[in-house]
Image: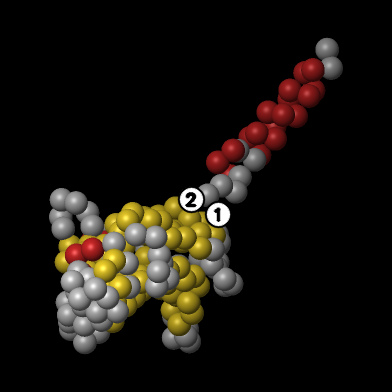
Amino acid sequence: MRLKPVISICLLLLLAFPASGLAKDRWISISPMAFSNHDESGKALLYKTEFGGEAYVTLGTTYGHVWAPVNFPPEADKREVNLVEARVFDNLDILNPTQVMDYAHIDVSLVKVDFETGQTTQVAWIGTGWQGAPGHIIISGSPSTNTEIDNQRYAWYLRLTVELQSSLFKDDLRLYGVRISYK
């Protein structure tokens, strides 16, 4: 009958440390609809489709960036960001009608702003590179440093940067969403 004390200890440990309290990945998703439509100079950057849930890049130039707020829930405080992922469609690495390779890249940065000092810190950066694989791809990366979530001290946002070699074929570059994982 030595099992009773062992079972009692196990039950006590489960009550003290429930499975939900163990470190496990949680995430928030940011829709492309959350991003601003225009860059800082007022030029249109994204055309959003309501039914498909994607944002087509509509650059009137070859470079621009827009922002989206990141609202971590209160229970994320004191946790660490451990992964940033974005799903994109990049079909620009093709020959355009002038028979020139038309390269593009999309970068997504997770940025925080300190309320006390106003200092901006880039926590994570992910990108397709100039010659990424065409089609639907997921770009991902782990953050560098200073990844603790503190909603009282920091405001968080995503910065989407798009750079095109030319302004042709803009509909072949799309953002489907961003996911941020934290532990």
* Up-down relation of residue 150 to residue 54 (above or below): below
- Identify which residue, 135 or 152, lies in the foreground: 135
Quarter of the image holding residue 146? bottom right
Packing grade of label 2 (10 A; few <14, some 14-19, many >=20) is few
Q: Report the residue marked by disc 1.
A: 183
Q: Residue furthest top?
A: 1
Q: The disc labelled 2 sits on which kind of residue?
A: Arg
Left or right: residue 2 versus residue 120 is: right
Quarter of the image holding residue 112? bottom left
Query: Residue at position x 65%, y 34% from top?
Result: 14
The quarter of the image holding the N terminus is: top right
Q: The disc labelled 1 sits on which kind of residue?
A: Lys
* Up-down relation of residue 102 to residue 48 (above or below): below
Whole-percent x, y for residue 99 in the image: 24, 73
Residues at circles 1 and 2 in contact by the CB criterion of under 8 Å:
yes
Q: Is disc 2 placed on a helix, strand or loop?
A: strand
Whole-percent x, y for residue 183 in the image: 55, 54
Q: Is disc 1 placed on a helix, strand or loop?
A: loop
Left or right: residue 12 versus residue 167 is: right
Q: Residue furthest front?
A: 99
- Identify which residue, 99 or 113, lies in the foreground: 99
Whole-percent x, y for residue 141 in the image: 51, 63
- Mark 1 or mark 2: whose residue is earlier in sequence: 2
- Identify which residue, 30 or 113, lies in the foreground: 30
Whole-percent x, y for residue 18 in the image: 60, 38
Query: Residue at position x 66%, y 39% from top?
Result: 16
State the separation of the CA atoms marked 1 and 2: 6 Å
Q: Which label sits on residue 26?
A: 2
Packing grade of label 1 (10 A; few <14, some 14-19, many >=20) is some
Q: Is residue 7 visible?
A: yes
Query: Residue at position x 45%, y 82% from top?
Result: 120
